[in-house]
Image (cartoon, rainbow, N blue to C red):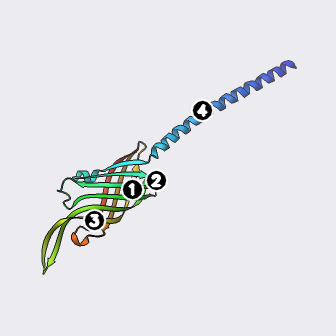
Amino acid sequence: MKYDRFVLNYLTIYLIKKILIITILFSIFNTNAQTKNEIKENQLERKNEIKLNAYFTALGLFEMTYERSLNRKSSLGITGLYTFNKKYDEDTNFLISPFYRRYFGKKYASGFFTEGFATIGSVDGKQLTDINGNLTLNEGPDVIDLSLGLSLGYKWTTKTGITFEAIFGMGRNLFNDDKTDHNIINRHAVSIGYRF
């Protein structure tokens, strides 16, 4: 009888130890897996991004963009464009465009988006005028103007933080339409970037 009680107590203690060891090991592995998943999610949810418009660079223009995510669905940013080769775009000198974006994708600040932007820029003062059926080219000084516009686009994001983006939009100059024929602002880009 004492022997049976001893064996029963020994087995109970043995089982409790095994259950505790298994529980502790399971907790350690589960915590480690959660930490790795959180690190991956945090890497994808980095807030800063810098991009280069590869399409414009190939055409002799330099356009760089900085974007800051406010949350998973919206961001603010600024784009700067400078024409260093007039061969492909002889009309634009420079553009600076702050913007606000609203994302509709499932991933953090990715997928389909809409954008509202404002542009302060310098274009040439060329104007074609029709005088009695004769077209005349008038070249005035460069014109600086403010424009407002809307864009649509799509952004792909990799797990390593590399981003690809395509965007198209249009805006209109607000103040100096009468001084140039270039009163529509086209916003288009095929960009590659890095989120950090």
Query: Mark 1 = which residue?
Result: 154
Between disc 3 and disc 1, the foreground one is: 3
Q: Residues within 10 Å of mark 1 (few under 14, many from 20)?
A: some
Locate the C terminus and report the quarter of the image it occupies: top left
Residue at image point 40% right, 51% down = 156
**Residue under label 3:** 145
Decide: few, some or many residues near mark 2? Use Cα within 10 Å; few <14, some 14-19, many ≥20. Answer: few
Quadrant of image for the N terminus:
top right
Mark found first going from the N terminus, 3 or 2: 2
Element assignment for label 4:
helix
The amino acid beneath tag 3 is: Asp
Task: Name the residue beneath numbered marker 4.
Answer: 28
Measured Cα–Cα span from mark 4 to mark 2: 34 Å
Marks 2 and 1 sit apart, C-alpha to C-alpha, by 18 Å
Callout 1 touching callout 4 (CB < 8 Å)? no
Q: What element carries label 2?
A: loop
Type of the residue with mark 1: Tyr
Residue at 84%, 22% in the rendered image: 5
User: Would you call the spot at circle 3 few (<14 residues within 10 Å), some (14-19), or many (20 or more)?
Assistant: some
Amino acid identity at mark 2: Leu
Label 3 sits on a secondary structure element that is strand
Check whether the beta carbons of the residues at disc 3 and disc 4 lie within 8 A of each other: no
The tag earlier along the polypeptide, 3 or 1, is 3
Percent position of residue 120, x then y: 30, 61
Which residue lies most toward the right here?
1
On screen, residue 2 versus residue 58, left or right, reads: right
Q: Where is residue 40 in the image (x, y as percent from the top left)?
A: 48, 41
